[in-house]
Amino acid sequence: MSWSLKFGSIFGIPIELHITFLLLLLIFSIFGVIPLLAIVLLFVSVLLHELAHSLVGRHYGAKIKKITLLPIGGVSQMEAIPKGHEFAIAIIGPLTSISIGIVLFLVGSLMGLNMTFDLNWIQIDSLKDIIRIVMSLNFLLGLFNIIPAFPMDGGRVLRAFLSSKMDYLKATAISVRIGQGLAIIFVFIGIFYNPWLIIIAFFIYMGGMEEYQSIQMSFALKGIKVKDVMVKDIVTVSPNDSLEDFEKLLIEKRYKGYPVVSDGKVLAIMTLNELLSVPRDRWAYTKVENVMVKDIVIASPEMEIFELYKKLAEMKQGRAPVIENERLIGFISNTDILRFSEILMIKRI
Ligand SMILES: [Zn+2]
């Protein structure tokens, strides 16, 4: 999902455009200015839908990281959806789209236009047709998203409803299963009617699974702190070590990553990947400090382990030094956290 370009921000929320949107622009420019304008308005419609989610989310205290716009809808990335407010945050998107559809219907009708539902982009040739197409798109966006296929909006509404009756994890599991069932139905409909549905089904299937696993992990790791999982017996490297020294250490200790320490201070992390980024014939005279990763995640012993796991994923890092009172007291890797959560999950089966 990293095929996105940032192009601006609204209300302080960065807006990214998925590359497929640009591709769509290119394709539709072949058909002329009017279909192209319709695509731009589709983009505005999706943006308004996502902004509604984000602004309501922010109202309830969620931190909005960014909005990514895809032709099949958008994604508002929020940090920790506030529990108890998921219903409002989810439902506002479809409500916004349907409201835009209704407004356009009224405007078009007042202008005496034919406002029947129509998604036939290619054949539109006047500005008047655009009102009809954009109205139809907004209705489609609103109604389609309300289908209870988690992680689509309707699925989130379903989970919000279920979690008022049962445990959040169980509510998620049921919503994901219903979503995956619907995704399979979408594939069949897609084969016969509209191939777009197959792509959407794929996103629903994978997205649901990913979110379920993440929530399952957050439950398993609840209350577990960094200090409970970290490795205390730390092997460090010096920034002045040569890559040849580092190779010897790797073979001897067999960990993939190490904190780089100088005068008792952690400067960076050095891993097998950085070593392999340098041709072997330069290892003897290249120092660790020339290739080490300086932009690292720092953990504290009292930090919740799941918070650290999310932070590492976000920063695309595999490990973090644990620091207390400016002293290195432990080291922790993604693999340690995953292994630990797998073991804890056994207890829940
Ligand atoms: Zn939505």
Image (tube, grey):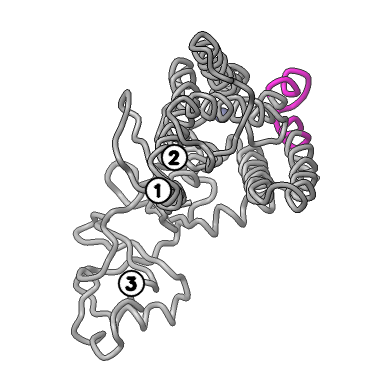
Q: Is residue 312 visible?
A: no
- The kind of secondary structure the magenta stretch mainly shows is helix
What residue lies at 77% left-to-right and 23% top-to-bottom?
166
Residue identifier under label 2: 68
183 left or right, relative to 44: right
Camera-near label (3 vs 1) is 1
Instruction: Please name whichever residue, 261 or 22, is drawn nearer the observer in this view of the structure.
Output: 22
Q: Secondary structure at mark 1?
A: helix
Identify the image quadrant of residue 282.
Answer: bottom left
Residue identifier under label 1: 29
Q: Label 1 vs label 2: CA separation?
A: 22 Å
Depicted 15 relative to depicted 294: above or below = above
Q: Label 2 vs label 3: CA separation?
A: 31 Å
Residue identifier under label 3: 274
Question: Bounds of the magenta span?
Answer: 160-174
Q: Residue furthest top?
A: 110
